[in-house]
Image (tube, grey):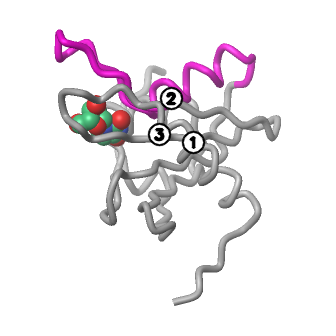
Amino acid sequence: MALDLTAEHKMLLALALKAQQNAHAPYSNFKVGAAIIDENAQLHASCNVENAAYPLGQCAEAGAISAMIASGSKQIKQILITSPNDEFCPPCGGCRQKIAEFASADTQVHMATQKGEIKTLKIADLLPLTFSLP
Ligand code: THU
């Protein structure tokens, strides 16, 4: 099947795949990459970073969000997550909340496989009834 990827999809996919190669995942052997386009059209990418003290491990999405915030941007327009296989890797529950903190209702969450197949959902559909403070 021919894939119809936009230029933004291609950039996000390339960046996430590159970061994924550097993932530190010796405990799960499950390498993940993530890339963001923010409100200033800047790109940010990261990978999961595990730790021998298991709960200290950090998801790929969290690293990409940290990079975005450190750069001065505040809004995730699109985020793409690359799985290490041919299945989609939906963001974990904690990462959905982390994405929602910097998202708008139409923020797109792309899930990509190693084959480059992409499935897109809105954060509002992945995390309905998002917790936020008034
Ligand atoms: N992981 C992510 O990086 N993002 C997700 O949304 C799901 C899970 C990582 C955490 C851990 O290093 C590995 O995948 C296995 O759970």
Asked whether, in this view, residue 57 is left or right of residue 20, the answer is left
Tell me which amino acid carries mark 2: Glu
Asked whether, in this view, residue 101 is left or right of residue 24, the answer is right
The response on whether ligand 1 sits within 8 Å of label 2 is no
Tell me which amino acid carries mark 3: Gln
Task: List the residue tagged with mark 3.
Answer: 20
Residue 15 image position (x, y, % from top left): 63, 44
Bin the neighbour count of mark 1 within 10 Å (Cα to Cα): few under 14, some 14-19, many 20 and up. Answer: some
SS class, disc 3: helix
Residue 92 image position (x, y, % from top left): 29, 40
Quarter of the picture for ligand 1?
top left
Residue 97 image position (x, y, % from top left): 39, 33
Earlier residue among tags 1 and 2: 1
Task: List the residue tagged with mark 2.
Answer: 101
Tell me which amino acid carries mark 1: Lys
Identify the magenta region.
Answer: 47-73
Q: Is residue 50 visible?
A: yes
Residue 124 image position (x, y, % from top left): 45, 51
